[in-house]
Image (tube, coloured by chain):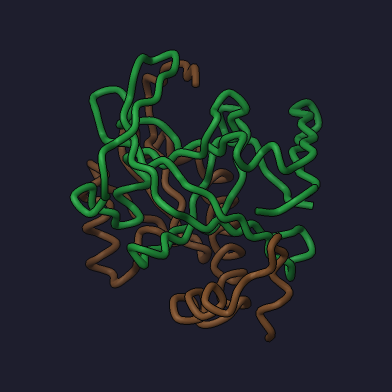
């Protein structure tokens, strides 16, 4: 699938395209990654009320197939991903905070 | 049209693929939409999940300030890609993202999508109807 359907202004240079291809393989791969991240995020959001009850104050992530990872800390969550051979940077996460504070950002 | 979502606290989020060409690191990030932030910023959780090592960040950190007080961040050349609702069109943004220096106050913060990106979009935000969508006016 050609790379020039990426909407960018100015259009991507050859060097920029090469950079993306080297890292991702194709535009479709980028979109597929985003799509799966979106699916995983939706699943995690839907499961959140149950997860809050079941795993209070734990760190969780979920993949697009609904597979859940639970850990006591962010470091443990990343380690669990590594142990499964997956990159944490492709998974949505939540801290199931039983004492949430308001955010002012 | 880029579609966002309201997460369980009702906060507005939009998903993006982040690529840092110098570090050759990428991550899918759920950014909190924040019109109060001048710049897009990556906070410690997402930094850790992306596998970014703070020791690999270059240069002197710049100072930022917010309601929580001053904070330091490392600017890093970044590419952000957002998926159109049609599922086949990616929008590409070249920005300098702020990578927050972890401190006692930012550990639990979501990463923020700031006005460096948001000013390129027409934003429709109607939490009463679960509507959060962005019409792309320009890319960078």
Query: What residue is rendered at 68% in x and 44% in y?
Result: B4
Left or right, residue B130 beside residue A55: right
Q: Colour of chain B?
A: green
Left or right? Give the position of B117 relative to A79. Answer: right
Q: Quadrant of residue B129?
A: top right
Horizontal side of residue B99 vs A45, given as left or right: left
Report the front residue among A6 and B61: B61
Nearer-the-camera pick, A50 or A2? A2
Residue B28 x/y as whole percent = 49, 57
Quadrant containing the N terminus of chain A in the rendered view = bottom right
Residue B84 vertical position relative to residue B101 in the rendered view, above or below: below
Name the one closer to the observer, A87 or B42.
B42
- Total labels: the figure holds 0
Residue A101: x and y in percent read: 42, 17
Q: Is A96 or A27 nearer to us in this picture?
A: A27
- Residue drawn at (61%, 76%), measured in percent from left and top? A27
* Looking at the image, residue B39 lies above or below residue A82: above
Return the residue found at the far left: B55
- Chain A drawn colour: brown
How far across and how far down the image is residue B45, in percent?
34, 42
Where is B16 relative to A17, above or below?
above
Indicate the quadrant where residue B116 lies. top right
Q: Residue at x 25, y 65 (%)?
A: A82
Residue most toward the bottom?
A1
Kindly identify the residue that appears in the image at 46 percent across and 61 percent down: B19
**In the rendering, at what x and y percent does residue A97 appear?**
38, 28
Occupied quadrant, residue A79:
bottom left
């Amino acid at each position: 699938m050609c790379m020039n359907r990426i909407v960018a202004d100015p259009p991507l240079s050859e060097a920029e395209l090469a950079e993306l291809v080297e890292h991702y393989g194709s535009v479709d791969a980028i979109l597929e990654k985003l799509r799966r991240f979106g699916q995983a995020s939706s699943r995690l959001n839907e499961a959140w009320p149950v997860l809050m009850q079941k795993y209070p104050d734990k760190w969780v992530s979920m993949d697009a197939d609904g597979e859940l990872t639970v850990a006591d800390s962010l470091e443990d969550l990343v380690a669990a991903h590594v142990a499964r051979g997956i990159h944490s940077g492709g998974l949505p996460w939540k801290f199931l905070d039983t004492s949430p504070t308001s955010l002012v950002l | 049209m880029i579609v966002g979502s309201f997460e369980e606290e009702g906060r507005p989020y939009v998903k993006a693929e982040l690529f840092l060409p110098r570090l050759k690191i990428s991550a899918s990030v759920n950014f909190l939409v924040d019109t109060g932030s001048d710049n897009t910023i990556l906070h410690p959780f997402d930094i850790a999940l992306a596998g970014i090592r703070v020791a690999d960040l270059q240069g002197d950190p710049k100072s930022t300030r917010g309601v929580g007080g001053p904070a330091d961040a490392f600017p890093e050349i970044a590419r952000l890609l957002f998926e159109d609702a049609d599922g086949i069109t990616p929008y590409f943004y070249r920005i300098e993202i702020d990578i927050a220096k972890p401190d006692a106050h930012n550990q639990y913060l979501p990463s923020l999508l700031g006005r460096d990106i948001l000013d390129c979009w027409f934003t429709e935000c109607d939490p009463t109807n679960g509507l959060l969508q962005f019409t792309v006016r320009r890319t960078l």
